[in-house]
Image: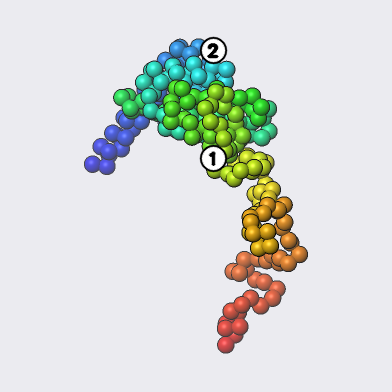
């Protein structure tokens, strides 16, 4: 029984790889020079397209059966000139195939909004703008949605400080919430990097019980 299940799993994986290879060839033929790369890894197809052809590429995929928009996000690579990967995941429900589509973007050049291709992309693009600072040209309402008004920076960038730039507190005298620069007072902190299971040069709490 186990051997039959393993054989079925192997057959399914082989069929899936064949489907993805055929899909990759079909996309490359349909989009031509707009496809910068198409790779299959871990039984997943990832297609990188030219940012200038972002909307035509997504429209082609939608009309080719990928009618289900799953999500949109970004990945930050600070060392690159175009530091962001804009990533879209799509589903073809009829063929039961999924695809990952990427384009490269920087901090100043907008990527065309895909809201007219998939209306569901609206909030996902706003989230990518808020968290990463990716700009989407033609978006109907590109405002922050998770951070506060006047928030400085984009929290999911890898160069954003873990502590943030400001901290908030309620001021009893002013009777309102105030923003202040983040302060990390180190002089009152003591750090012990020794594991309690390792031999320390001093008596740890509870050690006195071992001598009784």
Q: Position of residue 66 (x, y in %)?
A: 39, 23
Q: How many marks?
A: 2
Residue of label 2 = 33
Mark 2 and mark 1 residues within 8 Å of each other at the beta carbon: no
Camera-side residue: 99 or 208?
99
Quarter of the image with the C terminus in it: bottom right
Snapshot colouring = rainbow
Specify the quadrant of the image occupied by residue 155. Answer: top right
Residue 90 disc label: none
Q: Residue sitting at 28 percent across and 33 percent down?
A: 8
Residue 145 disc label: 1
Quarter of the image with the N terminus in it: top left
Q: Is residue 96 visible?
A: yes
The residue sitting at the right extreme is 187
Crowding near the residue tagged with mark 1, few <14, some 14–19, many ≥20 C-alpha atoms within 10 Å: some
Q: Position of residue 16 (x, y in %)?
A: 36, 27
Q: Is residue 188 left or right of residue 198?
A: right
Q: Residue sitting at 47 percent across and 30 percent down?
A: 121
Q: Position of residue 4 (x, y in %)?
A: 25, 37
């Amino acid at each position: 029984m186990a051997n039959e299940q393993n054989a079925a799993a192997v057959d399914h994986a082989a069929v899936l790889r064949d489907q993805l290879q055929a899909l990759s060839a079909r996309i490359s033929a349909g989009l031509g020079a707009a496809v910068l790369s198409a790779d299959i890894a871990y039984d997943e197809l990832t297609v990188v397209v030219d940012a200038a052809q972002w909307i035509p590429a997504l429209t082609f995929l939608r009309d080719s059966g990928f009618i289900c928009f799953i999500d949109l996000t970004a990945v930050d690579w600070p060392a690159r000139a175009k530091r962001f990967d804009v990533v879209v995941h799509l589903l073809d429900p009829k063929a039961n195939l999924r695809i990952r589509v990427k384009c490269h973007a920087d901090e100043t050049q907008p990527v065309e909004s895909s809201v007219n291709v998939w209306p569901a992309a609206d909030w996902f693009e706003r989230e990518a703008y808020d968290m990463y600072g990716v700009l989407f040209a033609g978006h109907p309402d590109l405002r922050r949605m998770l951070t506060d008004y006047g928030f400085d920076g984009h929290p999911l960038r890898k160069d954003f400080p873990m502590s943030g730039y400001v901290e908030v507190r309620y001021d009893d005298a002013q009777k309102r919430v105030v923003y202040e620069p983040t302060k990390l007072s180190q002089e009152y902190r003591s750090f012990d990097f020794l594991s309690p299971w390792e031999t320390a040069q001093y008596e740890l709490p509870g050690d006195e019980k071992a001598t009784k």
